[in-house]
Image (spheres, rainbow, N blue to C red):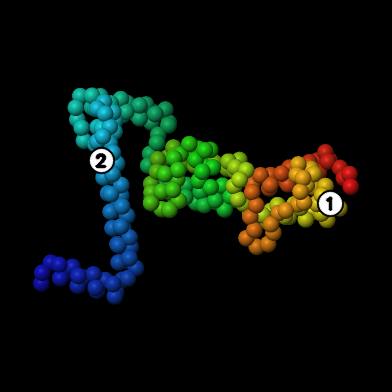
Amino acid sequence: MPALARAKAVESILSLLAPGFLREQREKERRVSAQEERLSKIKIACASKPHGTRARYAAGCKCMLCRAANSRYETVRALARKNGDANPIVSADRARRHLAELSAKGIGRHSVHEACDVSEQILCAIIYGQRENIRARTERRILAVDEGARRGKCLMPAAPTWRLLRELLRDGYSKVQIVEWMGGKRALQIKHGEGARITAATAMKVERVYNLIQAGKLRRTR
């Protein structure tokens, strides 16, 4: 039996007896292929870099200038490891979960990028599973981002804000008074209902008013 026919026969048998195994193998092949394609693109990009850079050395150049650049790079890395600042390759799973948690709170990749200085391209690759591994330093930067990175125009669930508002309304504060304390000039216009979202700026204004009232620094005038 020819090799190709034998391989197809084996694949057919595996698809019947162990479909899960076959799916895992195909997914593994897809990931390997994607990684090889990414490395190939990186190598092509590095080949256009000038001599005397680590990138050009990584592309395969072994001239004196590129070897010197690589030597400097390795020296810096060795010193960092000695000082406890190693930067090994780690799984991107923790960073991906953290980015998903931030997204659920209305903090998107643009805000994360501004907060941790990790490029949006890398963040996108992590979010969509295109990058399975990242450097430990990149992971630490992403995990350090918290709700303080939220920008004014970011959208977030309205439910927590409505819980604060309902408590204030039950305590006898009017919507007009709350809007004045928020610095607004129009009636309170905050969407409610399942899935409703508001801007982070509005949520922060309501939370600020609520905290000031609880601290006794704001009193009813109406």
Where is residue 5? Give x, y as percent: 15, 70
Residue found farthest to the right: 222
19 versus 97 height, above or below: below
Residue 169 in sight from this viewpoint: yes
- Classify mark 2: helix, strand or loop: helix
Q: Distance between the residues labelled 2 and 1?
A: 64 Å
Residue 209 in sight from this viewpoint: no
Question: Looking at the rendered structure, which numbered label has been put on residue 155?
Answer: none
Question: Looking at the rendered structure, which numbered label has been put on residue 44?
Answer: 2
Q: Which of marks 2 and 1 is nearer the N terminus?
A: 2
Residue positioned 40% across, 40% down in the render: 135
Q: Does residue 165 appear left or right of residue 55 in this picture?
A: right
- Classify mark 1: helix, strand or loop: loop
Residue positioned 84% across, 50% down in the render: 173
Where is residue 77? Give x, y as percent: 35, 30
Question: Looking at the rendered structure, which numbered label has been put on residue 174?
Answer: 1
Q: Does residue 10 appear left or right of residue 84 in this picture?
A: left
Q: Are marks 2 and 1 in contact (CB under 8 Å)?
A: no
> Local crowd at mark 2 within 10 Å, few (<14), some, or many (≥20)?
few
Where is residue 38? Give x, y as percent: 30, 47
Residue positioned 57% across, 53% down in the render: 104
Q: Which residue is more in the foreground, 214 or 17?
A: 214
Q: Does residue 117 appear left or right of residue 185 in this picture?
A: left
Q: Tell me how many marks there are.
A: 2
| Quadrant (top left, top right, bottom left, bottom right) of the N terminus | bottom left
Q: Which quadrant of the structure image shows residue 2? A: bottom left
Q: What residue type is labelled 2?
A: Ile
Residue positioned 51% across, 48% down in the render: 99
Q: What residue type is labelled 1?
A: Ser
Residue found farthest to the left: 1
Where is residue 46? Give x, y as percent: 28, 36
